[in-house]
Image: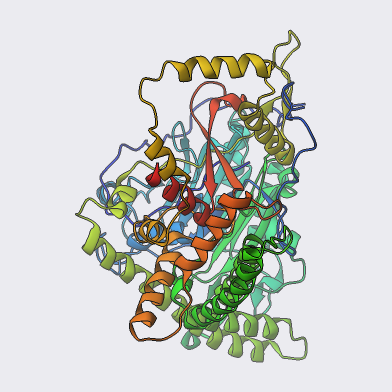
Amino acid sequence: MDTHRNVANDPFLQPVATGQTQHPPDQGNDPAPGRRQDPHPHDRVYPGPPEPLRRPAPGKKNTKAAVKVVALNINGRGNPDVRHGENRWYHIWQLIREQKIGVMIVGEAHLDDAHKIDVDNLFGRVIRVEFTPDETAPTARAGLAFVLNKGMVETAGIKTIEIVPGRAMILEMKSMDGTPLSILGVYAPNRPTENAAFWKKIEDFYVTHPRTRRPDVLGGDTNIVEDAMDRLPSHQDNKNATDALDKLKAYLRLVDGFRETYPSTRAYTYMQSPAQGGAQSRIDRIYVKRDLYEESFEWDIQAVGINTDHRMVSMKITTADAPTLGHGRWVWPAHIIRDKILAKFIDEEGLKLMDELAIITRNEEAGQWNPNHNTQTLWVAYKTKIGGKARERAKIVVPKIVEEIAEIKNKIDAIEADEELTEEEVTLSCVLLQEKLTALEKMRHTGARLTAQVRNRLEGEVITRYWTAVNKPKKPRDIVHRLQKNFNTEDPPQYETNSKRMADMARNYHKNLQSDRMGVPREIREAKIQTVLGRTARKVTEAQEETLKTKLTLKDIQYVVRKSASYKAPGLDGIPYEMWRILEQRYESRKAEDKRGFDIVGVLHRLYNDIEAHGIVKGTGFSKSWMCPIYKKNDKADIANYRPISLLNTDYKLFTKALAIKL
């Protein structure tokens, strides 16, 4: 159960302390024990059947909490100045942030201690870098690094072990549920004899260090393929090198996750230029332990905006008892609010709503209020219509460059799957499309980079919401892995790990707190309430009481709409305050031009008065909230140690604000 979401911002950041690479110890960590699987809700259960949980929309699946691991050969650091636009380390944080990467294995890192300090000074607040340099020319060749996203993984307590300087290093860290996770990063030599010796050296290391945890993941640039289909044109690689790699894989019980997932797919991570012949190969790979393969998913190969001749390989890894994460609530994207087609639809449907409300008002004045067809039900229907249209437009209104990238990817897939084409035709066609795809990814990446730089120039030195978000410490998202089921008992603790049942437990617990059924008789509670009220010195006067009985006015509602804050989280309908403000401004502009417009303030006025007169109509969900538990302190398995944050719809919050101001 995901308790909150963190959104990393583009920073120009302060240095933080980093760990040092450790050389192979005589003894490492003990092999990790088997992954534990802990064996209903509190005894205090909210009376009556629980409300059904919100299910994912059709076609969407909930996924387990996972860490994204990627491997990318960046082909050197580029310009030696880390702040220069051609320095590839300058772009790595942007890639990690956009792709939500937890751990990145970087080949041809070309890092030395001085450059590492520069990277830490600039990005140390959001990433942690551990590296092993080439012994003779650290800034000119080889070099391997791990980059950890502080907003996605826990970086405290990690350990690195160097096996081959500049080419092989182990990262030992904790997975999302706290169990050990070992990642072996590699950048193998290109020459076949050196390549074979490289895999043998890694195998010898694990043989001579039996207490070092064997890798759960191995990833990087292997500079070799195991199957002819992983080269274009197809051919077998050096047998001694492939045999050495096969032997290491067998010893470590590793499998090629991408090939296991896509056994017949041709996909490549390295491409020569047309002048070099346009040959392609899948030399960048990620392997996982065979028993962990079932816990991995989303295996992919993709072009990136960094100036490199390699593509990035990626996958996500989870654990057997990791909680399931939903997709969260859908929120109107900021750019969609001013979409012209959506704006026209909102106004047209709003005018229809006003006409229907006029008819209903006449009926109600005649004493004919219908509980199934009234202002509240019409308002819900209106919000449902515009919400559906907003979702539709959000899928359509995407940058043109994103559409072009998707189109080229589809063309490449179609060409590589066409069995009627010769290898020469596939090579020629793909190399041209891959070049265009890479160019488009660079354009998209550069555009996003420029936008971030402009915003940082404008807001980076001013105390704003942006500045606060950029400079606050980053930490991994809080995830509830388990909740204790049995309290007030001498039996050993029992835990619930199913995400849906944990959500039920949290909901029932907090509903219980708000109910009158906590074991205290109602008569006693009422007596206590009257005792407290009797000690209140200040009383409401008759004049004040009459004022409170009056209904909200148009001015009351217009005031709260105009004064509503920006950047506040909306409720389940996903509509932000900004939407209501824009509609109010649009109506005032039309009124000034003597044109009929959608009067959002007038509609809300009728809605709130209807609620004051008849109460909230059942089934409209007007006051329904989305609860987000935030961990406070003490045992994380006790739901009582989480503070609930309820996200309410903005139309409901406008209503309560107007009432509060009147009070």
Quarter holding the N terminus is: top right
Q: Residue at x 40, y 35 (%)?
A: 542
- Between residue 264 and residue 482, name the one nearer to us: 482
Residue 653 falls left or right of residue 495: left
The residue lying furthest to the right in this view is 49
Q: Residue at x 26, y 68 (%)?
A: 454
Name which quarter of the figure residue 182 lies in: top right
What is the quadrant of the C terminus in the image? top left
Q: Residue furthest top?
A: 490
Q: Left or right of 233: which side holds 116? A: left
Name the colour scheme. rainbow
Q: Residue placed at 66% from the left, 68% from the top?
A: 363
Q: Nearer the viewer, residue 204 or 628?
A: 628
The correct choice, above or below, for 501 with respect to 609 in the image is above
Residue 81 can be seen, yes or no: no
Residue 480 drawn at (x, y percent) = 61, 35
Q: Nearer the viewer, residue 5 or 163?
A: 5
Number of numbered discs: 0
The picture quadrant where one finds residue 510 is top right
Residue 57 visible in the displayed image: yes
Q: For this view, does 295 lie left or right of residue 173? A: right
In the rendered view, would you say 627 is above or below 393?
Answer: above
Residue 2: give x, y in percent of width and height. 59, 43
What percent of the width, then of the height, locates residue 106? Answer: 46, 56
Instruction: Give the x, y percent position of residue 285.
Output: 60, 60
